[in-house]
Amino acid sequence: MDAANYLYLSALLFTIGAVGVVVRRNAIVVFMCIELMLNAANLAFVTFSRINGDLNGQVVAFFTMVVAACEVVVGLAIIVTIYRSRRSASVDDASLLKR
Amino acid sequence: MVDLAISVGTTQNPEAILFWVLAPLTVAAALGMLLVKKAVHSAILMASVMINLAIFYIAQDALFLGIVQIVVYTGAVMMLFLFILMLVGVDSSDSLTETITGLRPIAIVASVGFGGLLISLIGRATLGRSAVGLSEANMNGNVKGLASLLFSTYVWPFEVVSALLITAALGAMVLAHHQRIQTRPTQREMSTARFRGESLANAAGLPGPGVYARHNAVDVPALLPDGTPAANSINATLKARGDMLTSGSFELGKVDTSAEEEK
Amino acid sequence: MLNSLTLLMALPIIGSIVVALLPKTKETLAKQVALITTLIVAGATIAMAVNFQRDNVDLQFVEKYSWIPTFGINFAVGIDGLALVLILMSTVLAPIVVLAGWNEAHGGRWSVKVFYILILVLETMMIGVFAATDVFLFYVIFEAMLIPVYFLIGGYGTGQRSAAAVKFLIYSLFGGLLMLASIIGLYVMSGAQGGHTFDLQALSQLEMSSTTQNFLFLGFFIAFAIKAPLWPLHTWLPDAADSATPGTSVLLLGVLDKVGTFGMIRYCLTLFPDASKTFTPMILVLSVISIVYGAFLAIGQRDLKRLIAFTSISHFGFITMGIFAMTSQGQSGATLYMFNHGFSTAALFLVGGWMISRRGSSTIADFGGLQRVTPVMAWSFFLAGMSSLALPGMSSFVSEFLVLVGTFTRYPVHAVIATFGIVLAALYILIPVQKALHGPTTAGNENLSDLNLREKIAIAPVIAIIIALGFYPSPLLKVINPASAHVIAQMGFTDPAPTNGDK
Amino acid sequence: MEFTTPVLNYTLLSPILILLGAALISVLVEAFVSKALRPITQLSITLGALVLALVQVWRIRNEQSLTAAMGSVIIDGPAVLMQASILIISIISVFLIADTEHFTALAASLPGSDEERQAVQSGNQVTEVYPLTLFAVSGMLLFPISSDLITLFVALEMLSLPLYLMAGLSRRRRLASQESALKYFLLGAFSSAFFLFGAAFLYGYSASVTFAGIRDAVVGSGGNDVFLLIGISFLSVGLLFKVGAVPFHAWSPDVYQGSPTPVTAFMAAATKVAAFGAMLRIYYTSFANAQWSWTPMLTVIAIVTMVFGSLVAIAQRDVKRMLAYSSIAHAGFLLTGVIALNKAGLEASIFYLFAYGIATVGGFAIVTLVRDAAGEVTDLNRWKGLGKRSPWVATAFAGFLLSFAGIPLTSGFIGKFSIFSAAYESGAKSVVIAGVLSSAIAAFFYIRVIVLMFFTDPVEDGTSVEIPSALTSLSVIFAMIVTIALGVFPAPVLNLISDLATFIR
Amino acid sequence: MTTSNSLVYLIALPLLGATILLLAGRRADKWGHLLGTLMSASSFGVGLYQLSQMLSRSNEARPVTQKLFEWISVGTFNVDAGLLLDQLSICFVLLITGVGTLIHIYSISYMSHDHDRRRFFAYLNLFIAAMLLLVLGNSYLNLYVGWEGVGLASYLLIGFWNQKPAYATASKKAFVMNRIGDMGLSFAIMIAFATIGTVSFEGIKEHAHHTSTGALTAIGIMLLVAATGKSAQFPLQAWLGDAMAGPTPVSALIHAATMVTAGVYLITRSNFIFDAAPTAQLLVVIVGAITLLFGALIGTAKDDIKKALAASTMSQIGYMILGAGLGPVGYAFAIMHLLTHGFFKAGMFLGAGSVMHGMNDEVNMRKYGALRKFMPITFVTFGLGYLAILGVPPFAGFYSKDMIIETAFNSGGTKGIILGVVTLLGAGITAFYMTRVMILTFTGKSRWDAEAHPHESPILMWLPMAILAVGSVSSGFLLSRGDALVNWLAPLFEHHGEHEELLAPIVVSGLALAMVAIGVAVAFLKYSRQEVAAVAPENVSVFTKIARQDLMQDSFNEAVFMRPGQLLTSALVKTDEHVIDGAVRGVAQLALGSGSVLRGVQSGFVRSYAALILIGAALLIAAIWVVI
């Protein structure tokens, strides 16, 4: 079993997450896709941690989770605010500012 | 890729099996997130991806992270997502048709290119050193190892993260907290206001909604004796949200049975 | 008297501060202060010119203060004959412009005060740009000068003034930025060859590959060619001249554009002698095109101000040709030409401006028979025109002929083609003269008033200088010659000896 | 693995600690101080903390330390300079933030609702912006001194999160403001994910999360550089996003436009300093030896950024958006400083950042002053004739624009000159040429605004210039003085920078 | 060589006059004409004084120089403002100041009714000064100043009545065509400097013998170009006819006696160049020959008395040029003809002016007739001039013109025969058209308009005419007596071997007289025997039509130079506007346009922004993929 497989998986999940950000319209789903990307990064960290035989990677992953949690709070607060004023959670509706 | 190959004792084969079983599931769940219509389903799929990842973490000797992933990430963060989804409307579903011209092909090309190139690149990587494995690092136990890093080397970011947490809390409060601008009117004041108002029409209180009269929900207005709907019988909040059904269809004499059937 | 360039530069600034402190309503006082300041500066410059050692080719009145030591930048000034002549021209023109355009500032966007502040600030920069011996300082002033001119055109001009001002500014900025790239190149190279510096002398000692030299040269040259303006980078000039007030036009064409030709000598030739040689054929062709093209375009103009602008393009062609002919006659002629062109253009623009402001139109066809109505004005214009077509006896003849002779000895074909310009010059001057001054007095021109005393006082010195230098250019040539000879020698050229045919 | 007792050098960390402490006090103030007293209290605390932090930074200016926080941060000359720049910019930004006119009275209220109206009438204020600002500033201070990926990431989030929030707090056009917050947040999180992914690969490549470790790996690497390159690229995506480089720039025009103008000023100026500070450090120390790999990439990005920013700015009709594109163009110019990879480049970048930051705050401060009955007027067409109505304001704005355009005798010129010469020195001539050409394009739109203000007749549509509050005028005047002073006598500042600007590793 | 300090007064006096008159403005109206005349006369006085001084010295010591100041000095290009008065220049000085003074006097009366008489005298003085500078300058560059100076004066005087658009145009035309010639002079100077290294007469003369023929030929040809411009020679002759727009005294002074002869002066002065450049010399001869016939032919068809005289001038200068082109022998004869022509042609012009004066400024000879009775003095003076120009012995023209015809025949070979025939033919045609002028003007029946009241002119006008008439009668004899002029000028020119005589002088004279007789006879038959129409008849031969149009010279210039020039100008104006400025504006538009297009990237959708980031990242990855 090749540890690189985890890296492939991580890259794949990251890509899927990135695509999700681009294709999904619901702000919350978009945000979840971003979380997916963060998770993919975490998987990479953990895998590298194992390859390198060094726990720093896991520490980073841990920090990532904490930071992601904070981000989620802020992000969801913003999404809710927007939803309350617009009655819509679609990111496409938020396109007043352009050009 | 030889460099990256890890032969870590007995776990080799079981881990491979685990990986090949769970990895497709994970990818499938992740892809599912993109493809399902309902946000809630996406959330569930996301949670399943996270749990799978947690298993991978544990399989990769990151026990603590695996647990945290389940407890904090899946348990807390994803729940927060679900809460918000509920708040926003649980049954809202996305149309998956693309409305921005040209975005979808671009997205597909970009992502396939991105993913494909990335994966092929990883395939071409060499490290010039062999993989180590965590057995030595985890000698004193994974948690202990992490703790000693966290509280010595990374004590500064660890401290600073607290600021982040405060920021998050503060931010949520700024955006969500309705400060009381004016003192809440007492019952007495409200009562006085009712009788000192412009007319006495509402002195006896507002009419209740037309629940059970023609319909079984609070978003239908009551009917006045002359058969016209009483607009003020609907809760102001519903009105403000625009959730009120158009009352015209409930007037007497113009009973619209189709509304009934629809429900 | 005071022999400090720094003080000379400070004087107009002080004047501008005084003007700025005046109350807005005291317009006449502002004008008077400006006039007196410019007169003092002119006097001080003349005093310096008297103290100037003519035979000394080194820089004189040198001053040097550290400015930005990190980059090796100094506030360094000093003048040679070339710079002296141009500073002299600028400072003498300034009071004339102030006096001639006494009422120019009215009808501007802003108050009269602002106009004179801008003029005075500009005068400081005009002195500084010629006096700078630090490339960086030169560049700073070169660019900063654009701002007051920009506001002078855009704020006090006529017609499409803001569009013209923008065009002028963008063009110049574009050139300036290319020059900046070259300056950076020089700076970096100086760093590699014994310490960062912007000292002109030191930079001229740099060793560089011919490719580098060519590119850096182009950066400078294009900037100067826009300024000068050389075909085909000239199209901003007619618009700017068309829109600017006459006084501004005088400063713009008479002084500012000289920075371009001055720069070609001072910077292009000094810093990049080899590249200059490489590009000489191309530049000479452009110059000849400018001469002929400018003349034809001038002939084809219906608007007086545009016409004058195009004549200047033709004249700048002569100057550039003289510079790159690489003969002492060409060099000296070109330098003298710069001086003379300042005055002849000043005369044309000032008188033309008076004509236009009286008639309320700048279309040549609107004038007619002015000679009968306003003889003094007509004569002034006529003399200015004669100066522009380089009639012998006028100062510009001397310079134009020197340029032609100097060019002929090395580049006969160019000189011959350029000489055709003198026929065209006759046309572009005589056509407006005929239309505007001669012929029957046409409707609308019967009641124009002739020049008043102030205007006569303003134009008299200009014409006097034009004629006096036509007959006796020696004082200037004696100042210019050593500087020109120095440049030619530095370039490694000697004047072609008489061929004596082939016998 | 033995546990080592952590030792923190509190003196060196004091600027950040002061700010964090003040932020905490601020939060408490929110809870315990009466509404009426809150604004002034918060303002004093914020300004006091910032000034104190600045003093502290000044006092440690000659310190150098790799171990101030167990190796998580590096204190050296550039760090001090960046921190000082950020603090100065923050102080004058706070002057703008203090003008309550720009922030919503109650963020939680629906736009256009009664609640909002009542909140406005009652003079309610979202004084939370002060602690948020303080948090953001402390994040910014931390960002350029971080010396491992973890701290870098934490700092990145720490400076971003408050900004996401603040972007949504505008008083007028609240929907747009909230939209900008959403966009900023989503894209910011998106780019952080890239950042993190890149960090993972750097970690994989070097088996270390510290900059020094990465550098060692770069110097003596055994395998090929795939992971390094992936790491650099993705990390760069995150950083380039923050500085607003093309194609990661798209958020900035929208966010600049939608955010409350003081916030725009703050984030345009201070974030740029912080982000470039971090970028310079990581490229100059960790990646320096892999120069061959990233220089072409950054070169292309820099060129595209400058040209794109300048070109698109020409077509803008809104002053804030125009400034946003101009800031994109400037990001391109600043990238040349990174590409230069020499001491001159570092010095130039620091100078440029400071000069640009100050001028930016000044510029946006002017934007806050031009208003009609409905708030700020950012439509350029309505700026016509501003020079006639309020000559001083227009002149100041013109001054800032000229500085942006890099006209001599303004700080922008010295900045441009020094940064281009540094890049030229390192052989990046193509960037210099592109920079020069796009400066020419850029000049076009700066000048267009000047034309609008001075050479176009005013339209009578109620647009007027507010009498600036004392604090706003203070920040404008300060910015103006700095802009001119750095243009005319930059020597002291340049000397200071050149004395201090050396990265230790 | 002698130096003198007084040469400058020759020029300074009239220049001072011009300056005072111009600067004083209307204040000088009362006495302006007197001052002008005085200045001219004083200059003449100085000239006489110089002559007397010169006569008192030996041949070698006669030339006088004066260095005024260093004019232009750059590198090896050193030109002093210096004057040179030698045997050649003194002839001109006296002619210019002498005839000039007479014409000043004439003008006092002729212009007395003009509002701007003062200005007229200022211009005349300016002209005298410039012309004197032309002949006194000691280098080509000094000459050039005078050369263009007379051009300016001529411009001002032709356009003196420039309120008439046609006159203004005429003056402009004269100036521009002169400038074309001046260009030739510029070229000559440049070539001289480039090849010889100096532009002074003395210097070039010194070096001429060791300078290549090619260079000298080039200089010579360019000098010829200059001469054709100033002297209205083919192909730059077209301006002279129009120049008659100026007041008649101007035509007499500038366009008959002095300025137009500057070309002859130039060629004669440059004898050292032409002597060494046979090709250039040949061209001179050819130009002279062509113009001689050209002018004569035009003269036959002109009804305007001044234009007829102008055509005659052109033709006569053709003789001079031809003479000057015939090398060392011809120079003196050219000068002699120049001097005699100065007298008789000036006299005839003044006569024409007098006629116009009496005829309400009518210039059309067909509206004259029988004026002999009304203007006897004019008739006599004019008649004497007529006889002189015909070359009837012993009038002045006989001596000078016969010499040229003789020299032409003697120049050898086929060339000699051709030239001789041409000059003879010219003499015949001259006789024809001058007779025509005499007949139409003074004899026959009157064909005046009703309001004309012909009368004799006042004394101030007829006195100069009378003096000039005396000159017309006697000058030829005086100058050729004992080869006076030839010997006087001889020191200046290289010695030449005696030519073989093709025809004896007496034969030549006989032939010439015969031709004249034929010409007179034909004219007499055509105009005296038949009624002359008051309006020019239309049914005339093609030749007449063409001749009336100056042999199509204007049409030619218009078609070949003016129209294409105008087209070129307007094309260039359009090019400038659309192509060059268009390119500039195009660049601006391009920037603006691409800005607007790129702006589209900013669609407002956060997802497309994310896509942009994704694309960016993908590109980075792709780049890595390429690199690794």
Image (cartoon, coloured by chain):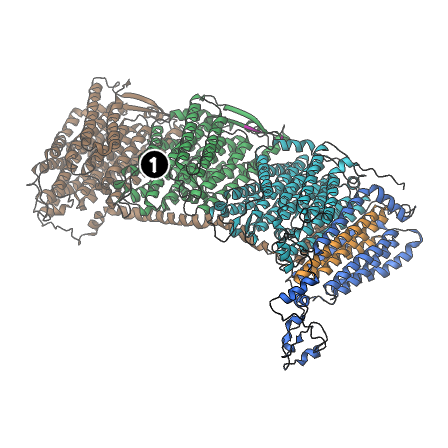
Chain colours: A orange, B blue, C green, D cyan, E brown
| Classed neighbour count for the residue bearing mark 1: other residues with Cα under 10 Å, few (<14), some (14–19), many (≥20) | many
Compared across the picture, whether A76 is left or right of E286 comes to right
The outermost residue toward the right is B10
Q: Is residue C112 left or right of residue C141?
A: left
Residue E558 lies, in percent from the top left, at: 30, 48
**Residue type at numbered disc 1:** Ala
Nearest the viewer among E368 and D373 is D373
Q: Which residues are magenta?
A: C70-75
Q: Which residue is mark 1?
A: C384
Image quadrant occupied by the N terminus of chain E: top left
- Residue D339, quarter of the rendered image: top right
**Farthest residue in the left direction?**
E373
Residue E303: x percent and y percent? 17, 46
Q: Which of C270/E516 is in front?
A: C270
Q: Chain of mark 1?
A: C
Indicate the position of residue C208 as horizontal and vertical percent values.
Answer: 59, 32
Task: Tell me residue C7's x, y (percent).
Answer: 49, 26
Which sits in the foreground, E223 or C88? C88
Please give left or right for residue C457 compared with residue D117 in the image. Answer: left
Q: Is residue B20 left or right of residue B202?
A: right
Q: Is residue C255 above or below residue D198?
A: above
Magenta residue check for C71: yes
The image shows a total of numbered marks equal to 1
Q: Nearer the viewer, residue C285 or E202?
A: C285
